[in-house]
Amino acid sequence: MNLRGIWIPLITPFKNNELDITSYKRLIEHYTSFDIAGLVPMGTTGESPTLNMIEYEKIISVTMEYKPPQKPVIMGLGGNDTQKLIDKLYLAEKYQVNGILSVCPYYNRPSQEGIYQHFQAIAAATDKPIIIYNIPYRTGREIENATLRRLAEIPNIVGLKDASGNISQTLELLLNPPPNFSILCGEDSFFFISLLHGGAGGILASAHMHTGSFIEICQLIWNNDHLAAYKLWQSLADFIPLLFAEPSPGPLKYLLQKQGLIDSEEIRLPLVNISSALKQRLDSFII
């Protein structure tokens, strides 16, 4: 599986507190019309912690049934109970997803050795490619670069979604990457910097909007047209922070509903719909 490019971590549409499968299919059709690398359902952008197992499996099944054959799917599968995650791996086999995105265990704050053994156990339980997700400001625990390099030695741990929020750590890893290991940006505001230092692309919530521009920035940089890429990036740089000014994916759902891609901006508790003030700021970026 080629990880290079822009991956869309799909939001999950709701209507009257039920899955809105019609809107979800519309999203799949829309994003796969672009030259994206693939889709990532059931990540945290998809509000996966609020879905029960029936809903979770429904989203995976619809994604695999409705997406074009040439577009790969990486399934979000994260948590802080290693055995429970291993037990859920049957879904990856049942629906023949192309890979798994798994976040660092949260809340119980394992040691670096605990983090290593957690991912080692998941990797031993499947032959699916695994992408590790490092986002310490949400999980309460950093995956250190030394630990990532150990994990990269496991054959089916193939990449990282990097949202460390620590530019020094990010650059150190990008400049000294493990062999045959893809580093994908997950910190949307660091996307341009990551690409310039050899990043493979991104799993970016903000790429729900201006999708073609994110793809074009990749192509321009890989074609050594850095100035044109920078000018395009400038047009996005002020927009991206607005998508995270209130808890994600609330801002995205508002914009997607305004564009007619989903029928409702509904979001599940404990998240709530965004404020009227933010809606006014976002309106100027609707394309």
Image (spheres, grey):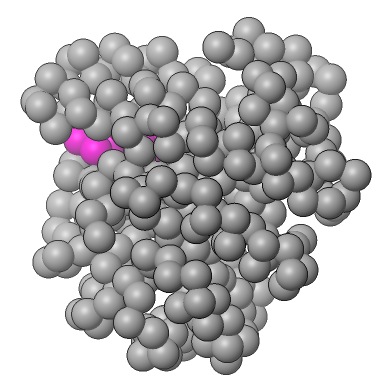
Q: Quadrant of residue 144?
A: bottom left
Span shown in magenta: 190-196
Q: Is residue 151 magenta?
A: no
Compared with 63, 218 (above or below) is: above
Give 54 or 142, whichever is nearer the viewer: 54
Question: Outermost residue toward the top?
Answer: 284
Q: Position of residue 47 (x, y in %)?
A: 68, 54
Give 78 or 168, whichever is nearer the viewer: 78
Main SS of the magenta part reads helix
Q: Quadrant of residue 247?
A: top right
Q: Position of residue 138 (x, y in %)?
A: 60, 59
Q: Position of residue 84 (x, y in %)?
A: 62, 86
Q: Quadrant of residue 277?
A: top right
Q: Which residue lies at the image location 27% right of the left edge and 77% below the top edge?
A: 156
Left or right? Give the position of 196 relative to 64.
Answer: left
Left or right? Give the position of 55 relative to 134.
Answer: right
